[in-house]
Image: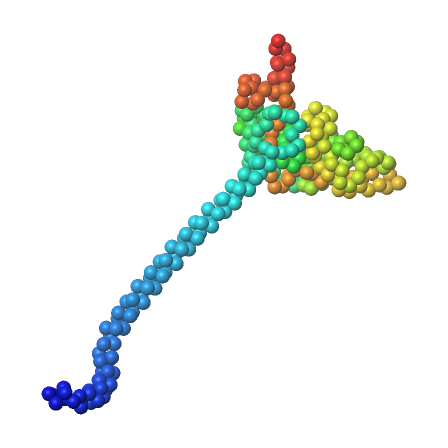
Amino acid sequence: MTFDHRQHHLDSMRSALSVLVYPLQWLVDMPGSAGEWFRESLSTRRELQEENASLRTQQLVLNTQLQKLEALEAENRRLRALLDSSFQIGERQMRIATLLSVDMDPYRHQIEINKGSLDNLFEGQPLLDSQGVVGQLIHVGPFSSTAMLITDPSHAIPVQVNRNGLRTIALGTGSIDRLELPHIPNNADIRVGDLLTTSGLGGRFPPGYPVAEVTDVQQDPGRAFSHVTARPRAQLDRSREVLLVWPPDVRHPAEQTMTGPPEAAQDTAGDTP
């Protein structure tokens, strides 16, 4: 041993023996190593699965919050468009209402809103959105009201051509994107693209509100009148909020103590010294 310690003659033999013994050592150690590797693999896989599930949950929550944020942003834009409408004609009384339901009958274009007589609404009150006239109230309940859209087949609204003041009537056709203008002579000055606004005749709609835009003018020499159609300016099939307006000489609904229609309030105000 002393001689080997000094001369290292058995190193090569020990190296050869270690090579021969290594497979036996590996076989002896394999069950423990395999078990440890298996436990680490299971633990790592479980951690990855838990982390993956947690990340999926977080992504779902964030996507849901993002959708809600987009909906709030869209609602905010609609409300701003209502309040910042450029076609206000001086009506200082206004209130925003939200749609509750839409009549699914294809022959009736009616909607229900979440305001009623308790909010001092009255039958015949005009409804608008950020683009134009939507319709008018035909029934007022305590908490909700029914409005008829301008495209309803039984609806008619007095209008005038904004360019030259030509007066006519816009009739609903039952189609959400089309109005008809009957009894316009062939020699009348009306063109495609003309803006139609409320004329104020009849006292139901205040004058000057955008109603529709002329889309087609057909003049037949064999007929006395032209066939004229127009497209409503209001987004009748997309608006979720509408704007209710009161005449400028009616007190604000929150201050109005009478439960009757605004006409009664006007008469009473006229008797006040």
13 or 222: which is nearer to us? 13
Q: Is residue 111 visible?
A: no
Task: Tell me: 7 left or right of 151.
Answer: left
Residue with the most extreme top position: 273
Task: Tell me: 28 left or right of 76.
Answer: left
Q: Quadrant of the rendered structure where residue 200 is?
A: top right
Q: Is residue 131 visible?
A: yes
Residue with the most extreme left position: 2
Task: Tell me: 103 left or right of 33.
Answer: right
229 or 55: which is nearer to us? 55
Where does residue 62 sit, x and y in percent of width and height?
Answer: 45, 49
Q: Quadrant of the rendered structure where residue 210 is?
A: top right
At 56% from the left edge and 23% from the top edge, which residue is drawn? 253
Compared to 227, does 94 lie above or below?
A: above
At 61% from the left edge and 13% from the top edge, which residue is drawn? 268
Where does residue 248 sit, x and y in percent of width and height?
Answer: 63, 22
Residue with the most extreme right position: 222
At 17% from the left edge and 88% from the top edge, which residue is drawn? 8
Where does residue 107 sit, x and y in percent of width and height?
Answer: 67, 39
At 67% from the left edge and 41% from the top edge, which residue is drawn? 176
Compared to 259, does 220 lie above or below?
A: below
154 or 57: which is nearer to us? 57
Where does residue 230 sit, x and y in percent of width and height?
Answer: 74, 39
**Quadrant of the image containing the N terminus:** bottom left
Q: Quadrant of the rendered structure where residue 191 is?
A: top right
